[in-house]
Image (spheres, coloured by chain):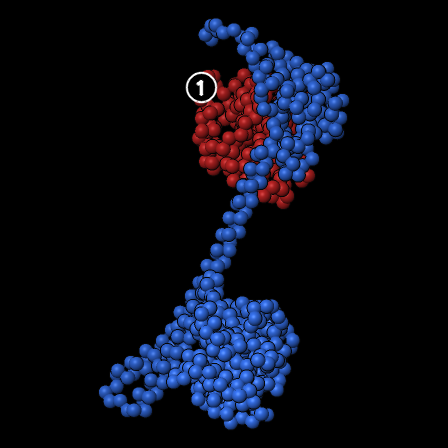
Chain colours: A red, B blue
């Protein structure tokens, strides 16, 4: 299943609405102007996800993972290069740096950032689908890309798709890129695309 | 299909509820969709000071209106929509204002991280649950870690800087050590290669070799001194000393090289300069280094002036030359180690750049200060050393504390000094003379007796200062002879002995033999002056 150009544009626009809210929330929290943009999205069957992500990310990554459930269910992840994660945390707080491995406060900050993004993005999906999804408590891991991918591909049945959302953070004259990955079953994807077309038609 | 549960789920649920309420070390509370409290666990009771019975049924935002003003309410509204919100300590500091558990962190509220989520029953959201963690300990640990990492970073930077300075020094060192070595090797090879050697050539070669080997030895000495100072291993042998003679002997040391360059050295010292406390060898090194520096940077035919002035509190030595002067930009660095005004490889003046650094370190070890002044290149330079003088408190001969003797303490007093060892004799004579005494110094008991016997009433010594250990007749024999004279001939002249024999038995023997005072060698000049002044006032 591929997204048509129109569907892709509508999806980007939809996510941008969510990211606008997330950026505003982050700006308010940190006192710095934070802008979030979606330059590109990709959709692929889950078995291609690992190859696609490998092109975009280092092997050492920081991942915020939330599971959502309800009429649509799946996994939502914010994946950042380990370096980008450290830089993002630096830019958003005034604490001097510690290695992420021993800095629980920094990991908590990254968890909250991921939580805000994932909530904003899935919240907009929920809105156009007119369904309520419930989230698990977000969880941050510092691990290799391999094991992150492994943890979401393993042990699930049915055809699933991964939506990879390139996410640009702009703040304090810096910018860095993270990747939002939303893994949905084929049924949820079809619902989402139909809703998207309706939403696009309504505008 | 899930396996059949044979567990008593009712009891487990009750146990879980009990654990959440009473045992977990986190704050847990539950609200209904109107944010009225339904569960308020024991941790919340303890830290909020509000009992569960007082808060159940009341709205969270009525109890904590301040939380609503910080925008917390929207997270609760999000929870009713199914969202879980993480509140990091870094961004929020706390969820609900509770008193701090660790006062050292300096926050008015307990630092917290929290999450707020929906509570669902059969897919319907029936309320919210909040979990609060006290992160005081975590913050304290992270704070300590940051400090540790910062300290390590600073230590690393210092080490790198030191390493860099060392590298630079090593390159200067190898250059400077090689220069005299080249001359030594070069002339040695010339001598080896020649079939026949004429005397003049050999003379010249040996002079060059000797001069360069000496220069290298001096460099090595300077380096070793600097190493001792840097490692805190330099020990000063402090004694009361006469700074005038230190300065004059330093001038003697430098005279040959000044003469060789036709540089005039004019010396003006204040003869009443008081005594100072210091290490005579190290102070001489200070003056020699200043003078060598002046000779090195003064052109042939120039002049150096050495002045020693005295005030009540300090001795002030200035060394002024007509040399090439010091650039204003370099002036602040002139006493730094390994620094020379001209650091280029073609510089005219060699050396390790340690001489003036040693001057500063040694002067400071003596409690003094050194400064440099120059009107710029080609205008000469003046170096000034200030050392505290002995007007400070010292221990007097009788053990009590007293201020040092004034410069006229012995004015008009005639002293007969008997000492066979010339250096000791000169030292004692210099000290006595400086304080105004008229000194007759002799080297034996027999000469001393002659002086007394040939004196008239007007020239009879007022005080005798005598050594004990002397060849032929010792100090005991002398005092016996003196005391056998009639009072008018000098038999009652008070006497002090200076001796290396200083056990209580020695002291007793000296006093029994007829001395009034006993001073141990090496003699503290201040003690000697005070002893003579005291004896001159006493009749025996």
Q: In screen coordinates, is A90 left or right of B169?
A: right
Quarter placement of the C terminus of chain A: top right
User: Residue shown at 52%/6% (left/top)?
Assistant: B8
Residue B50: percent from left, percent from top: 71, 22
| Nearest the eye: B344 or B394 | B394
Residue B503: percent from left, percent from top: 45, 69
Question: Which chain is home to disc 1?
Answer: A
Residue A134: percent from left, percent from top: 60, 19
User: Residue shown at 68%/29% (left/top)?
Assistant: B98
User: Residue shown at 32%/78% (left/top)?
Assistant: B185
Residue A59: percent from left, percent from top: 45, 36
| Nearest the eye: A75 or A108 | A108
| Nearest the eye: A179 or B182 | B182
Q: Which residue is mark 1?
A: A155
User: At numbered mark 1, what does the secondary structure look like: helix, strand or loop?
Assistant: loop
Mark 1 is surrounded, within 10 Å at the Cα level, by few (under 14), some (14 to 19) or many (20 or more) other residues, namely few
Q: In screen coordinates, is A11 left or right of B337?
A: right
Is residue B133 among what the camera can see?
A: yes
User: Residue shown at 54%/20% (left/top)?
Assistant: A74
Up-down: is B376 above or below B172?
Answer: below
| Nearest the eye: B508 or B189 | B508
């Amino acid at each position: 299943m591929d997204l048509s150009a129109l569907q892709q544009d509508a999806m980007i626009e939809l996510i941008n609405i969510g990211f606008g809210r997330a950026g505003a929330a982050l700006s308010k929290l940190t006192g710095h102007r934070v802008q979030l943009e979606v330059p590109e999205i990709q959709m692929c069957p889950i078995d291609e996800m690992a190859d696609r992500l490998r092109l975009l990310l280092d092997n050492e990554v920081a991942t915020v993972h939330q599971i959502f459930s309800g009429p649509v269910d799946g996994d939502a992840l914010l994946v950042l290069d380990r370096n980008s994660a450290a830089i993002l945390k630096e830019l958003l707080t005034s604490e001097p740096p510690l290695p992420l491995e021993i800095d629980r406060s920094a990991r908590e900050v990254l968890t909250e950032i991921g939580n805000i993004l994932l909530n904003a993005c899935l919240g907009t999906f929920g809105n156009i689908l007119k369904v309520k999804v419930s989230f698990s408590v977000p969880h941050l891991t510092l691990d290799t890309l391999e094991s992150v991918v492994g943890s979401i591909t393993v042990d699930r049945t049915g055809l699933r798709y991964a939506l990879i959302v390139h996410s640009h953070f702009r703040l304090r004259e810096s910018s860095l890129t993270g990747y939002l990955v939303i893994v949905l079953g084929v049924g949820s994807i079809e619902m989402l695309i139909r809703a998207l077309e309706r939403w696009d038609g309504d505008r | 299909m899930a396996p059949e549960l044979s567990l008593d789920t009712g009891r487990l649920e009750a146990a879980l509820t009990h654990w959440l309420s009473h045992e977990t070390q986190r704050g847990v509370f539950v609200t209904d969709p109107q944010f009225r409290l339904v569960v308020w666990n024991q941790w919340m009771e303890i830290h909020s000071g509000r009992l569960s019975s007082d808060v159940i049924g009341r709205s969270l935002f009525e109890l904590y209106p301040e939380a609503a003003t910080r925008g917390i309410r929207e997270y609760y509204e999000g929870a009713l929509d199914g969202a879980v919100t993480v509140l990091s300590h870094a961004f929020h500091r706390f969820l609900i204002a509770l008193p701090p558990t660790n006062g050292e962190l300096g926050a008015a509220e307990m630092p917290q991280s929290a999450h707020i989520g929906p509570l669902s029953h059969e897919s319907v959201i029936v309320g919210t649950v909040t979990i609060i963690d006290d992160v005081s300990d975590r913050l304290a640990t992270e704070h300590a870690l940051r400090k540790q990492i910062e300290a390590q970073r600073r230590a690393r930077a210092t080490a790198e800087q030191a390493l860099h300075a060392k590298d630079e020094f090593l390159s200067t060192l190898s250059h400077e050590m090689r220069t005299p070595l080249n001359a030594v090797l070069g002339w040695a090879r010339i001598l080896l290669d020649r079939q026949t050697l004429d005397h003049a050539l050999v003379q010249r070669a040996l002079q060059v070799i000797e001069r360069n080997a000496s220069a290298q030895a001096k460099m090595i000495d300077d380096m070793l001194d600097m190493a001792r100072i840097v490692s805190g291993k330099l020990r000063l042998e402090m004694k009361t000393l006469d700074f005038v003679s230190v300065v004059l002997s330093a001038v003697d040391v430098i005279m040959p090289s000044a003469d060789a360059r036709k540089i005039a050295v004019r010396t003006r010292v204040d003869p009443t300069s008081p005594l100072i406390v210091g290490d005579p060898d190290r102070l001489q090194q200070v003056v020699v280094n200043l003078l060598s520096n002046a000779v090195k940077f003064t052109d042939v035919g120039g002049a150096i002036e050495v002045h020693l002035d005295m005030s009540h509190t300090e001795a002030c030595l200035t060394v002024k030359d007509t040399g090439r002067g010091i650039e204003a930009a370099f002036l602040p660095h002139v006493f730094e180690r390994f620094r020379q005004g001209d650091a280029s490889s073609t510089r005219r003046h060699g050396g390790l750049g340690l001489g003036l650094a040693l001057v500063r370190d040694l002067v400071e070890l003596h409690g003094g200060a050194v400064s440099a002044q120059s009107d710029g290149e080609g205008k000469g330079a003046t170096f000034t050393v200030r050392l505290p003088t002995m007007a400070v408190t010292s221990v007097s001969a009788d053990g009590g504390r007293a201020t040092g003797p004034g410069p006229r303490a012995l004015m008009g007093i005639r002293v007969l000094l008997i000492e066979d060892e010339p250096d000791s004799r000169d030292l004692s004579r210099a000290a006595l003379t400086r304080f105004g005494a008229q000194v007759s110094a002799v080297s034996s008991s027999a000469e001393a007796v002659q002086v007394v016997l040939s004196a008239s009433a007007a020239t009879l010594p007022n005080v005798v200062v005598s050594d004990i250990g002397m060849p032929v007749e010792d100090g005991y024999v002398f005092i016996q002879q003196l005391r056998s004279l009639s009072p008018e001939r000098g038999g009652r002249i008070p006497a002090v002995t200076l001796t290396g024999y200083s056990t209580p038995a020695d002291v007793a023997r000296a006093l029994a033999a007829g001395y009034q005072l006993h001073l141990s060698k090496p003699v503290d000049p201040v003690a000697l002056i005070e002893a003579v002044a005291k004896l001159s006032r006493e009749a025996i």
